[in-house]
Image: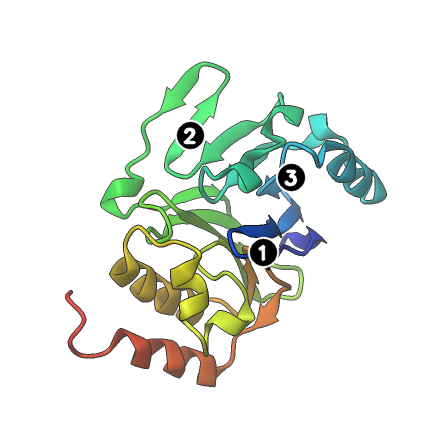
């Protein structure tokens, strides 16, 4: 089992007509492998180092860095972790060596018995979600911007207006992840528990006329 520690909750707030304040959720997994998911903006390096130190982890202790997608608020401090293998969306690398994993064919990548990375395109076409079995024997999903925040379940315009390269795939993958997960760490809000009502709401949003 892995310990799931949300180092920082993400947020996004419009601060003007064409301006917003935003940063992503950043999560640490401590278990067979130490994993950090979504490393915030390039201005947050000291925040991340301080948060890791509070949890007795040094950057060199991290085995995997996973960025759910390649936007700047999710990859800003990947270079703190030079001993780790990096997964950025569908790209898997260590130094200048790249491993061609078939995420594009729907295949998951298993980190260890408790942690796996699954393709969940929509927000971008190479988005991934990290699924982990926690110490509480629950499944926690770190989803990046597949879900912006809890509020976008009842108000889908939130995730649509945040940008979606394929809204149909995103709707389907939102429902797919909710069917698996007990808890979701969204890209720009606090962790929330998945209820049966949430699962049914997401299924209804897909609708019978949605292309397969």
- Asked whether 139 or 192 is in front, the reply is 192
Which residue matches tag 3? 34
Count of labels in the image: 3
For the residues labelled 1 and 3, the Cα–Cα distance comes to 39 Å
Identify which residue is drawn at 64% across, 49% down.
27
Q: Where is residue 153? Give x, y as percent.
A: 46, 74
Q: Earlier in the sequence, mark 3 or mark 2?
A: 3
Q: Residues within 10 Å of mark 2 (few under 14, many from 20)?
A: some
Q: Is residue 180 visible?
A: no
Image quadrant assignment for residue 160 = bottom left
For the residues labelled 3 and 2, the Cα–Cα distance comes to 17 Å
Residue 16 tag number: 1
Q: Is residue 21 visible?
A: yes
For the residues labelled 2 and 1, the Cα–Cα distance comes to 37 Å
Identify which residue is drawn at 27% across, 74% down.
206
Identify which residue is drawn at 30% across, 50% down.
165
- Asked whether 7 or 189 is in front, the reply is 189
Discs 3/2, front: 2
Which residue matches tag 2? 92
Q: Is residue 200 above or below residue 116?
A: below
| Label 3: element kind | loop
Q: Residues within 10 Å of mark 1 (few under 14, many from 20)?
A: few
Identify which residue is drawn at 61% across, 40% down.
35
């Amino acid at each position: 089992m892995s310990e799931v520690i949300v180092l920082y909750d993400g947020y996004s707030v419009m601060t003007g007509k064409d301006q917003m304040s935003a940063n992503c959720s950043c999560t640490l997994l401590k278990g067979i492998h130490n994993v950090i998911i979504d490393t915030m903006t390039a201005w947050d390096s000291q925040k991340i180092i301080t948060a890791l130190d509070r949890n007795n982890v040094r950057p060199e202790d991290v085995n995997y860095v996973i960025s759910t997608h390649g936007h700047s608020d999710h990859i800003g401090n990947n270079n703190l972790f030079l001993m780790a293998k990096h997964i950025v969306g569908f790209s898997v690398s260590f130094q200048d060596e790249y491993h061609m994993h078939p995420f594009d064919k729907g295949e998951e990548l298993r980190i260890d018995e408790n942690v796996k990375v699954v393709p969940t395109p929509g927000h971008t076409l190479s988005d991934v979600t990290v699924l982990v079995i926690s110490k509480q024997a629950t499944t926690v999903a770190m989803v990046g911007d597949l879900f912006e925040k809890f509020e976008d379940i009842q108000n889908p315009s939130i995730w649509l207006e945040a940008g979606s390269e394929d809204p149909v795939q995103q709707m389907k993958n939102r429902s797919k992840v909710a069917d698996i997960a007990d808890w979701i760490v969204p890209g720009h809000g606090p962790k929330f528990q998945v209820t049966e009502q949430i699962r049914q709401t997401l299924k209804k949003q897909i609708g019978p006329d949605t292309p397969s």
